[in-house]
Amino acid sequence: MLKNIIIASILAFSLGMQGCSKSEESNSLEIPEEPSENIAVPQLGQLTFSDITTTGAQVVGHVSHRGGAFVLERGVCWSKEEMPTVDNNYREATSAKGSGEFGLQLTGLVQSTSYYVRAYAKNKGGIAYGQQMILRTADIQSVDFAPKPLFIIGSSRASYDVEIVSSGGGAITERGICWGTTENPTVADHKIAHGSTGIGKFRANLTGLTERTNYHLRAYAVNETGVSYGTNVPFRTIGKGNVTYTFNKASNPNAEQLAAYDRLQVAIDSAVWYANNYTSATKHVWLNYDAGVPTADANNEGWMRFGANASYQNIRTMLHEMNHTFGTGTTSWWSNQAISGGKYQFAQVNTVLKLITADNNAVLNGDGMHWWPYGLNQNSEVTSSWDFVYNCLIIEAMRRDGMTSHSGSYQP
């Protein structure tokens, strides 16, 4: 019995020794700390700054020596006064490289201001600070605009696409366009503010202009430096169109006819509004409802017919048919001069199309009757009411190119 007890004790001691051996092997992978009496505070290298803005910078620091203990925290502290500490303002770095390098983004500073910045690091021995460095935030500059051409011009209205590419490092609190009849207008003349702020693109719309009048406009934006202006853009409004209509109706219409009349009334009034505001054409058209017509049709004399299909009794179709009364697809000018090889041949239209599409290679396509894009040939082509405006801009450009039959000669 005694022999068995001795053997069991030896086995238990042997197993215990094996467990201690495994634990020591695992700990050997970690960097051991110095004894407490040998621990010093960390040592820090020089800070570097990059990407300095009006409100901050990217900061890189380096713990060059741990002081014999694990670094518990590292970062930077700053103040407008010299020799800042963590009792002033500080930000801890959330990660560091094995070499001791760490980085962080310093934010929330004030523009055009000098700050004293030091790196700091903590271990069991205490907190240490690096060399004091001076960081000066950037000055706020004026707002920077991308130059843009103006191409949406009507008789009493115009629209300008503004692009702000830089806020100058400040906060844009207002943006819009200003205009007048003299060069380089300011916000003291006439202005319209856009509802949003900040950088980016927006479209500003002018109304209440006088037909056949020379104007100038500039984009503007307000930041901490004051009002900044874009380049001066001169433009001239066109003559107001004179498109009128007669709506032929049955003397005793049935319910189907009355419903069609209601839809067509909205369509013709809307189409005439677009034509009179964005073209200078003179034309009288006769609107007719004919249930036997499959879709809709029109001729150059101004006769328009709409069938019973309600999906064609809309603004899109009305403008499309009105285009035919102006001369697209219904005149010898169209068939003999304007379209060749499936492409529109004259400069004014293709210049406008390049501006609308922002594509310097854009050329209008066409056939014996229709043209595209923006010819409003199908309901699916309409993505917004701006497509109606673009349609009229191209019609006006066709008039400048020589499409004069039955719609009045073009007069600048």
Image (cartoon, helix red, strand yellow):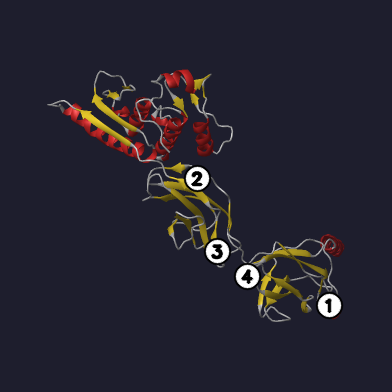
Which mark, residue 111? 4
Of residues 94 and 410, the one nearer the viewer is: 410
Local SS, label 1: loop
Going from N to C along the chain, the mark reached first, 4 or 3, is 4
Instruction: Work out how far the residue at label 4 is from the one at label 3, CA to CA, in angstroms.
Output: 11 Å
Is residue 383 in sight in this rendering?
A: no
In the image, taking residue 374 as reference, residue 122 lies left or right, namely right
> Of tags 1 and 3, which is closer to the observer?
3
Q: Which residue occupies 28% across, 23% down? A: 305
| CB under 8 Å between discs 1 and 2 | no
Instruction: Work out how far the residue at label 4 is from the one at label 2, CA to CA, in angstroms.
Output: 35 Å
Local SS, label 4: loop
> Of tags 1 and 2, which is closer to the observer?
2
Report x, y in % for residue 28.
85, 62
- Residue 78's image quarter? bottom right
In the image, taking residue 49 as reference, residue 251 lies left or right, namely left
Local SS, label 2: loop
Q: Which residue occupies 46% across, 20% down? A: 367
Amino acid beneath label 4? Gln
In the image, taking residue 171 as reference, residue 252 lies left or right, namely left
Quadrant where the C terminus lies? top left
Amino acid beneath label 3? Ala
| CB under 8 Å between discs 1 and 4 | no
Quadrant where the N terminus lies? bottom right
**Mark 3, residue position:** 171
Going from N to C along the chain, the mark reached first, 1 or 4, is 1
Which mark, residue 39? 1
**Mark 2, residue position:** 150
Of residues 1 and 400, the one nearer the viewer is: 400
Up/down of 208 relative to 364, above or below: below
| CB under 8 Å between discs 2 and 3 | no
Of residues 39 and 62, the one nearer the viewer is: 62
